[in-house]
Image (cartoon, rainbow, N blue to C red):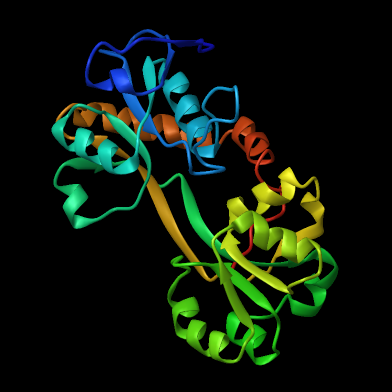
Amino acid sequence: MKSRMYSVVILSIFACFGAQVATAADCEKAYSIAYSNNYIPYQYVPKNSVPTGLDIDVVKSVMSEMDCEYNLLLMPSKRAQMLLKRGMLDIMPAASITVERSAYAYFSEPYRDETVAMFVRSSDYNQYKDYKLRDAVDQKLSITAGLGGWYGPEYGEEKQRAIDSGVLRLNAETEARIQQLLNHRVDMVIADLYVGYHHAIEARRLNAIRPLPHLLNADPVHFMLSKESVPPGFVAKFNQALAAVLDSEKYKELLEKYRPADSIPSN
């Protein structure tokens, strides 16, 4: 069944948030799903457009597979967690499993990894393809990374040495870092895999950068479902639908919106 997206007015606590609704049948209710507007390319709203991003594409496909109604509700992550805990929100994406959250939420099977990669120019890939971060620091490659970002334990071990030796510079904008790489001002950019590719796509130079095979970090993320508002049976059906979506050819085609088909590094 094809889903239709249309605007709705929420006459409840959600009235202050932007919302999109897809109609369907055969479910007990319309399930509320939170999303963020500042988590590019996973969840965001392009100017004068509807909510989009990899996380949103996946959850829309899952709900369509289940033939369920859903409301997409724009809200900050902290507020979404509070409402989900109270049973006033059903689902939120991009969640890591913690003991605290497990007290009030079910977790879906993982649907992607938050992957930290070391991007280099494609023209330099063969020269650096066997590098780990330690090798890049030893060889005095110029490297950029984000201010305050968590890039895994390996980065944590090498960060201060890299700063002290003058090879690592930090700034707040991934877009700026990717532009520095494209313009030959740095040799390597440390960034989330999909975020790095997003900015290369925006610059229309997708094939100009490439992640090295060695990953700095990879943590699975899940959909979080409220124990107050979602029955266990729904969670089981959600996981079945999620597995079907992730195994589909349509999903493989979807991923090519966000990265090249052969771009997944591996340790």
Instruction: Pick the residue in front: 23 or 14.
Output: 14
Is residue 267 in sight in this rendering? no
Q: Is residue 233 left or right of residue 218?
A: left
Residue 81's quadrant in the figure? top left
Q: Quadrant of the C terminus?
A: bottom right
Residue 240 drawn at (x, y percent): 39, 32
Residue 1 drawn at (x, y percent): 51, 11
Instruction: Name the residue located 45 percent from the left edge and 37 percent from the top edge.
Output: 243
Residue 119's quadrant in the figure? bottom right
Instruction: Name the residue located 73 percent from the left edge and 45 percent from the top edge.
Output: 201
Instruction: Check the image and report above or below for 232 versus 141.
Output: above
Q: Is residue 146 left or right of residue 177?
A: left
Instruction: Check the image and report above or below for 190 versus 62.
Output: below
Instruction: Name the residue located 60 percent from the left edge and 92 percent from the top edge.
Output: 165
Q: Is residue 202 left or right of residue 117?
A: right
Residue 93 drawn at (x, y percent): 38, 39
Instruction: Check the image and report above or below for 98 versus 69.
Output: below
